[in-house]
Amino acid sequence: MKTKKISGRIQKIALLIAMAIFLIPVASCAQKVNFSISTVTPAAKGSVKVKKDSNKNYRIKIHIVNLAEPSRLSPPRSAYVVWVVADDNVPKNIGQIKTSTALFSTKLKADFESVSVAKPKKIFITAESDPSIQYMYSEIILTTNNF
């Protein structure tokens, strides 16, 4: 009788440990969100990954393909700018995306990586004449839904 109780408890403990091992990596995975299809650059497709790092900052990684050069837009622009909206609902310029052609490919690719102290609620990209602006002037090229 005692051996059945002990083996039953060991099975329960083993099950709890196995669940904890499975759930810890799932909880720490990056959240991936796709950009909505753009009316300005309809061929562009991309995604954003947001992950909390060991310093409790949020690492933001953006990958986009088929993003036309900003100089080919109408009206032409000089740069794509990445904006983050956090809890204060104020868009903040966190940097510029540069497009490039992949080796052995004609696809225009763009990658961007940054860190934010506040958790992003929404991320979007505009085409601007000046990449250092603090307030957006152009229409939104790509945007995510709320995280």
Image: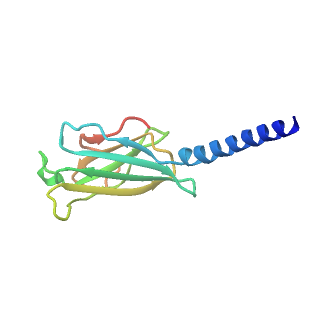
Quarter assignment of residue 17: top right
Q: At 84% from the left edge and 40% from the top edge, which residue is drawn?
A: 3
Q: At 18% from the left edge and 52% from the top edge, which residue is drawn?
A: 70
Q: Is residue 30 above or below residue 37?
A: below
In the image, residue 117 lies at what x, y percent? 51, 52
Is residue 4 found left or right of 58 in the rendered image? right
Q: Is residue 146 above or below residue 112?
A: above
Query: According to the image, what is the colour scheme of the structure?
Result: rainbow
| The C terminus: image quadrant | top left
Q: Report the front residue among 15 and 41.
A: 15
In the image, residue 101 lies at what x, y percent? 18, 61
Q: Report the front residue among 56 and 78.
A: 56
Q: At 19% from the left edge and 55% from the top edge, which residue is drawn?
A: 108
Quarter assignment of residue 37: top left
Report whether residue 131 is seen: no
Report whether residue 16 is seen: yes
Q: Report the front residue among 43 and 105.
A: 105
